Amino acid sequence: MLRSGIIFLADDDCEDVELFRDALTEICAHCNLFSFPDGYQLLEGLRNCNKLPDLIFVDVNMPTIDGFEALVQIRQDRKLSAIPTIIYSTSSNQDHISKAYALGASSYIKKPNDFKTLKEILKKILVLHEKF
C-alpha cells in the first residue's frame, strides 16, 4: 500500500500525462499524481514538497533538465535517493536503457501505445515496489 499515495511524473507531453493520470486513477483510486513538465520543475517540486512521493516516473527527453540529469540529481540527494525512480520513455534504445540503470533507475518502462497495456505496466510497477 502506498504510504502517502503520492506519485510524481515528469513528462513534457500533456497527452502522455493525461493518459498516465487516467490509468493510475483506474488502478489506484487513492493515489495522487503530481506532474511536472521538465526535470528542473520536478527537482524543485521534490525539494519543496511537504511529503515526498512514493514513486517518481521520469521521461528522458524533456526541456531544461532531461530525465537522465534529473535521475542523477535525485540519486545524489540523500533526502531523495531512496525513492524508487522509474524512467518512462518512448525510447527503446539499448544505450538509453543501459544508461538509465547505470545512473540508478529502479526500472525502465517504454511508453506503451494503448491504455490497457499502460494500466498493466503501472500495476506491475506498483506491486514490484510494494506500493499497491
Image (cartoon, rainbow, N blue to C red):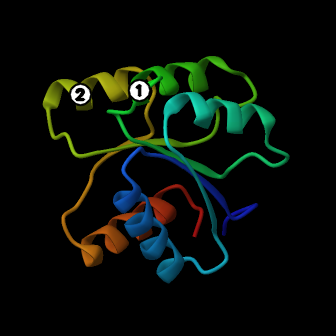
Farthest residue toward the left? Answer: 93
Query: Looking at the rendered structure, which numbered label has been put on residue 66?
Result: 1
Q: In x, y percent, where is residue 28?
A: 56, 77
Report the residue at 15% width, 30% height from top.
94
All told, the count of numbered labels is 2
Which residue is the site of mark 2? 96
Q: Quadrant of the N terminus?
A: bottom right
Q: CA distance from mark 2 to mark 1?
A: 12 Å
Query: Looking at the rendered structure, which numbered label has been put on residue 54?
Result: none
Please name whichever residue, 12 or 29, is drawn nearer the observer in this view of the structure. Answer: 12
Label 2: which secondary element: helix
Q: Is residue 11 above or below residue 102?
A: below
Q: Is residue 99 left or right of residue 50?
A: left
**Badge 1: residue crowd in 10 Å (few <14, some 14–19, many ≥20):** some
Q: Is residue 117 left or right of residue 76?
A: left
Q: In x, y percent, where is residue 2?
A: 67, 64
Report the residue at 50% width, 63% height from top.
126
Report the residue at 55% width, 43% height from top.
84
Q: Amino acid at mark 1?
A: Asp
